[in-house]
Image (cartoon, rainbow, N blue to C red):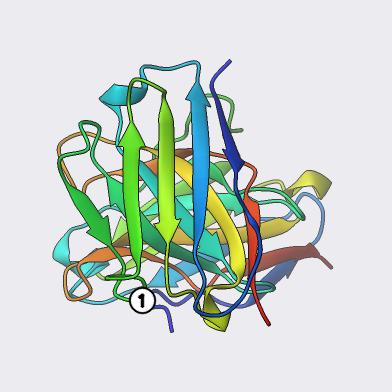
Amino acid sequence: EVQLLESGGGLVQPGGSLRLSCAASGFTFSNYAMSWVRQAPGKGLEWVSTIRGGGDSTYYADSVKGRFTISRDNSKNTLYLQMNSLRAEDTAVYYCAKNRGSGSYPYWYFDLWARGTLVTVSS
Amino acid sequence: QSVLTQPPSVSGAPGQRVTISCTGSSSNIGAGYDVHWYQQLPGTAPKLLIYVNSNRPSGVPDRFSGSKSGTSASLAITGLQAEDEADYYCQSYDSTLSGYVFGTGTKVTFL
């Protein structure tokens, strides 16, 4: 079964750090770009970051650039999001998503989503 | 503030046809970037509904259809059913923002 399973969410103080993980199964992980998308409470979806299958290229939303780092370990079929200098406005459910599409970035879409993990930034 | 604008809500009677618009600009939909649609049932993760403007993934009922023209796109639901009550989001790429963008979201409810 094709599946994505996140972990690592929780409560963190402003200025703190947190690392999210997303374990993939049921498909050849290294063949696909992967992304993080977040959703603040009661709000819409916001793209956060994308990484190519080989991990050689990464892309970030301006709102997280310089604070968040996306990475992957293809030997472990796992995607990561290192979040530093966290702010209250980073509070959201973070979704790990698999990318698909013909061609290269940015001609991709999100064809498989994990259940989401809640990150709360508060003192 | 999203660059893709959707109506906050649309409603219809069971069996009726409803449409959701997604209005962009020359830096996203109008630049030729594809539009994709996602359905988010209450309390769950989004699910891919339509990809590359008008294609349905396996398992998505054919009462869902998508189209794109100029700087806008539309999602149509024909024969509205109870399980279609959800939030719907369009998504594309914006060359000015250099990133993926989602629409503001539309809640579909029964009259």
Residue placed under numbered mark 1 in the picture: A63
Seen from the viewer's position, the closer of residues B69 and B92 is B92
Residue B32 spot, x, y in % from top left = 17, 59
Residue at 31% in and 68% down: A61
- Residue B52 in view here: no
Can residue B60 be seen in this snapshot? yes
The local crowd at label 1, few if under 14, some if 14 to 19, many if 20 or more residues have their Cα within 10 Å, is: few
- Relative to B50, residue B40 above or below: below
Judged left or right of residue A54, residue A72 is: right
How many labels were placed on the picture?
A: 1
- Does residue A32 sit above or below B97 in this rendering? above
Q: Quadrant of the N terminus of chain B?
A: bottom left
Task: Identify the element where label 1 is drawn.
Answer: loop
What residue sits 51% from the left and 49% below the top?
A20
Q: Residue B72, position in %: x, y?
A: 34, 68
**Residue A95 picture location, percent across and down:** 54, 50
The quarter of the picture where the C terminus of chain B appears is bottom right
Q: Which subunit holds the residue at mark 1?
A: A
Residue plotted at (82% across, 53% down): B14
Q: What amino acid is labelled 1 in the image?
A: Ser
Which sits in the foreground, A106 or A88? A88
